[in-house]
Image: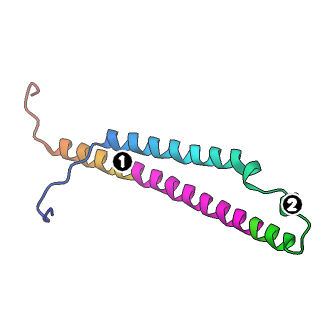
Amino acid sequence: MPGMADEVRADPEAIVRLAKATLAGADAMTDGWSAAQGVVAAPGAAFGNSQAGPALAAGSDGAAAATDTTWRRLVTVYEGDVDRLYRVAFAYQQADSDAAARLPQRPGGI
């Protein structure tokens, strides 16, 4: 386990690539869920005309609504992760720039 004095290194470009991949995943999840909506919702006739039919239909509708809510929340978490990854990448890039600016400059370059 790293101690307080240990250095942490990160590649801002790699973090940005991860953010882009995470965003693409969130977008694909949204697109996939939207495309599946017609398949997920069972038609009312699927529950027959028995006395239990309306209760089964209501249960199915409730489950579909809960799944929709869960799916959207999951996508929201991924989108939040994207924002956080971009902020971390920027912070590391800024720290690198600040550190480079503090380095002594040699006459005539390196």
Residue that sits furthest to the top in the current view: 108
Q: Residues within 10 Å of mark 1 (few under 14, many from 20)?
A: some
Q: Residue at x 62, y 48 (%)?
A: 30
Q: Amino acid at mark 1?
A: Phe
x then y, percent, for residue 45? 88, 58
Q: Main secondary structure of the magenta part?
A: helix
x then y, percent, for residue 24? 52, 41
Residue 68 lies in the magenta stretch? yes
Nearest-to-viewer mark from 2 and 1: 2
> Which quadrant is the N terminus positioned in?
bottom left
Magenta highlight range: 61-86
Q: Residue at x 62, y 58 (%)?
A: 72
Q: Amino acid at mark 2?
A: Gly
| Along the line of sight, the residue nearer the viewer: 44 or 32 | 44
Label 2 belongs to which residue? 44
Position of 90 compared to 58: left or right? left
x then y, percent, for residue 75? 56, 55
x then y, percent, for residue 17? 39, 39
Which mark is first along the chain, 1 or 2? Answer: 2
| Along the line of sight, the residue nearer the viewer: 104 or 80 | 80
* Count of picture labels: 2
Position of 92 compared to 63: left or right? left
> Which quadrant is the C terminus positioned in?
top left
Label 1 belongs to which residue? 90
Q: Secondary structure at mark 1?
A: helix
Q: Residue at x 25, y 47 (%)?
A: 10
Residue 14 lies in the magenta stretch? no
